[in-house]
Image (spheres, helix red, strand yellow):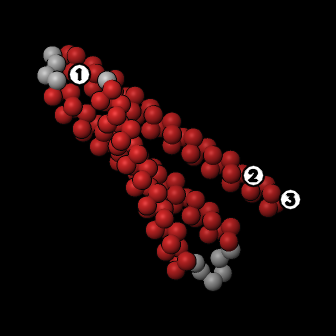
Amino acid sequence: VQETRDMFWGVFAGGKDFAKRSSMWDLIFMGWRWGRDEQLVTVVLRWLMQLLMNFTLGLIGALFVFVWRLWGLIAAYKPDPLTAAMYFGAAALSATVCVMSYLALMYAAAAGTVGVVGKALVD
């Protein structure tokens, strides 16, 4: 079980690192795409959406990598097929719930931020 946890958190960190690197490059090159008539709010919202998309792709990609590697980890212990299938299902479901919860919290925080900033700009 500890090996599975370590593998999951390592792959999860790799997915976050991918998202951070992608977002850094998006921010660096965003200056070239900044239109003459665009306001700062529009550019920041576009970058926020790009950030959310990068984290979504990075973490879902990490989830697929984890599930792919999980079967190899289970097969190394040579368990009986029923135990292997049960453990694989439980570990894959746990990893999926963790990734989806993380993404849901990120999207909720982004929506809350946009709502508060939008309200502040209107008032």
Q: CA distance from mark 2 to mark 1?
A: 46 Å
Residue 6, compared with residue 110, is above or below; it is: above
Residue 22 occupies which quadrant of the picture? bottom left
Tell me which residue sits at (24%, 38%) in the image: 69
Confirm whether residue 120 shows in the render. yes
Tell me which residue sits at (31%, 23%) in the image: 1
Residue 70 occupies which quadrant of the picture? top left
The C terminus lies in quadrant: bottom right
| Image coordinates for residue 80, horizontal then vertical, percent | 15, 16
Mark with earlier residue (1, 3)? 1
| Residue bearing mark 2 | 116
| Residue bearing mark 1 | 85
| Image coordinates for residue 109, horizontal then vertical, percent | 63, 46
The disc labelled 1 sits on which kind of residue? Ala
| Residue bearing mark 3 | 123
Asked if labels 3 and 1 touch by Cβ distance under 8 angstroms, the answer is: no
